[in-house]
Amino acid sequence: MTFDVDSSNGTAIFLGDLIALEADGNVAPASAGSTQLLGACVGIYHSDPGDSTGRSLEGGGSNDLNLSLKYLPANTAGKILVTVGPDVLYEAQEDSAVSTLALTDRGANVDFVAGAGSTTTGRSGYEIDSDTVTSIASAPLRIVDIVRREDNEVGTNAKWIVRIHTHHFSAANGV
């Protein structure tokens, strides 16, 4: 779904950043410890803040997804494409700051680290906080499995499949 980002958002949004819905109906990057996540950014529209029609700067129409835009700069109004299904599966890298995840952590809940993305690649800097494995329901992500690929294995900076455990549309309370 397409969501608005207002110019008061002080954090750049990168592809893959976890997104939270704000009380005013706009979205912003989720901060670590957020308990209601909406989804992840998968595209940038980037609207001109002075243009009330919602047209993109480059394409001329509100349905133009600009694949050349790698991120939405901080304090810039725009539109982003967000995955919103509560059962969407994501690939995420663990931070391995103190410890690493194990296969026995499948089914557990974890928090995330809201790292800065790359303005060169447009990729998110968000990672699984591998030191927060818990059964507590408020942890926002659930570990599903390790990514089964030849270039991945359990250990430092392993890639995992996760889903949003505390999804906004599954929560009892609204914004």
Image (tube, rainbow, N blue to C red):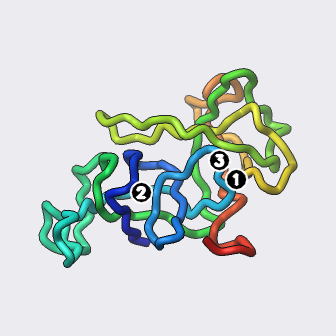
The residue depicted at 48 percent of the width and 52 percent of the height is 29
User: Which residue is tagged 1?
Assistant: 140
Q: Compared to 21, does 42 lie above or below?
A: above
Q: Nearer the viewer, residue 116 or 163?
A: 116
User: Is 79 placed left or right of 134 in the picture?
Assistant: left
The residue depicted at 61 percent of the width and 71 percent of the height is 175
Name the residue at the front extreme. 8
User: Which residue is tagged 3?
Assistant: 161
Q: Amino acid at mark 2?
A: Val
Task: Give me the disc on residue 42.
Answer: 2
User: Is 114 placed left or right of 42 in the picture?
Assistant: right
Q: Nearer the viewer, residue 94 or 56?
A: 56
Q: Amino acid at mark 3?
A: Ile
Circles 1 and 3: CB distance less than 8 Å? no
User: Is 136 placed left or right of 71 in the picture?
Assistant: right
Whole-angstrom CA distance, mark 1 to mark 3, is 14 Å
**Residue 103: x %, y % from top left:** 80, 36
Q: Amino acid at mark 1?
A: Pro
* Mark 1, secondary structure of its residue: loop
* Mark 2, secondary structure of its residue: strand
